[in-house]
Image (cartoon, rainbow, N blue to C red):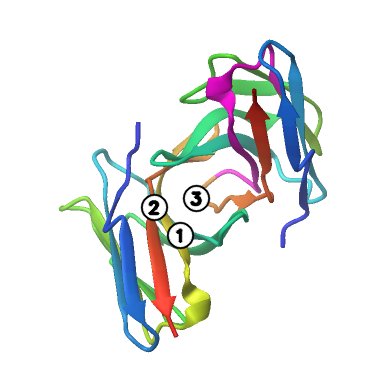
Amino acid sequence: SQQGEEDPQALSIQEGENATMNCSYKTSINNLQWYRQNSGRGLVHLILIRSNEREKHSGRLRVTLDTSKKSSSLLITASRAADTASYFCATGRLNNAGNMLTFGGGTRLMVKP
Amino acid sequence: DAGITQSPRHKVTETGTPVTLRCHQTENHRYMYWYRQDPGHGLRLIHYSYGVKDTDKGEVSDGYSVSRSKTEDFLLTLESATSSQTSVYFCAISESDGITTQYFGPGTRLTVL
């Protein structure tokens, strides 16, 4: 079962525009992470936000977390063609597996030059 | 990139044959994970390891077994491959206890005919 559900499933924008992707989840979490996957490649970690944090920034990325609504958003500002990829949220819970991640189905982002 | 390699990178096999995929890390990380990625399902956890000879089942473990005899190697075996196991398989590693990220390998594309 998927803990995180991304919305939209696909997004097409022009270069220079901002891209916003949303993630909703169902159960309590310790942290939430966003990953990026280029076509045919492995996942690359972008940003981690803990459950007691509300917002984090990394370069052109801004992530928010609202635990009361069980939702997160990833904002990519001033998008570039090179941002074209699939983006996944993953909810994290701590157990004997370490930080156990459950992934959503992803958002496919296309940035047109 | 984290030092994670997967072998083979591509494999075509026939239904009923056993298949073993290998994940090798040079990071000396404690935790290792096997996921499968299918369209519409994101990544789903198959098995994970929290130390040498310490493994446990994930969400979709039926038909799979794992072994970890050394810190650096985590093997995934499909005991008798079926067409439903056609997928892309990713290995991931994580460093320590607590809230940490996972680092992913490049993936193995497996086709079961």
- Provide the secondary structure element on which disc 1 rests: strand
A42 left or right, relative to A73: right
Give a yes or no on whether discs 1 and 2 share a subunit: yes
| Tag 3 residue | B99
Which of the 4 image quadrants contains residue A53?
A: bottom left
Chain under callout 2 = A
Query: Separation of disc 1 and disc 3 at Cα?
Result: 24 Å
Q: Residue A86 has which mark?
A: 1
Task: Tell me the magenta residue range.
Answer: B77-97
User: Is residue B86 placed above or below A27 in the rendered structure?
Assistant: above
Query: Separation of disc 3 and disc 2 at Cα?
Result: 22 Å
User: Is residue A7 placed above or below A1 in the rendered structure?
Assistant: below
- Provide the secondary structure element on which disc 2 rests: loop
Q: Residue at image x 40%, y 86%?
A: A15
Q: Residue A106 has which mark?
A: 2
Please tell me how crowded label 1 is: few (under 14), some (14-19), or many (20+) other residues with Cα within 10 Å.
many
Disc 1 to disc 3: CB gap under 8 Å: no
Q: Position of residue B21 (x, y in %)?
A: 75, 30
Q: Residue at image x 53%, y 77%?
A: A82
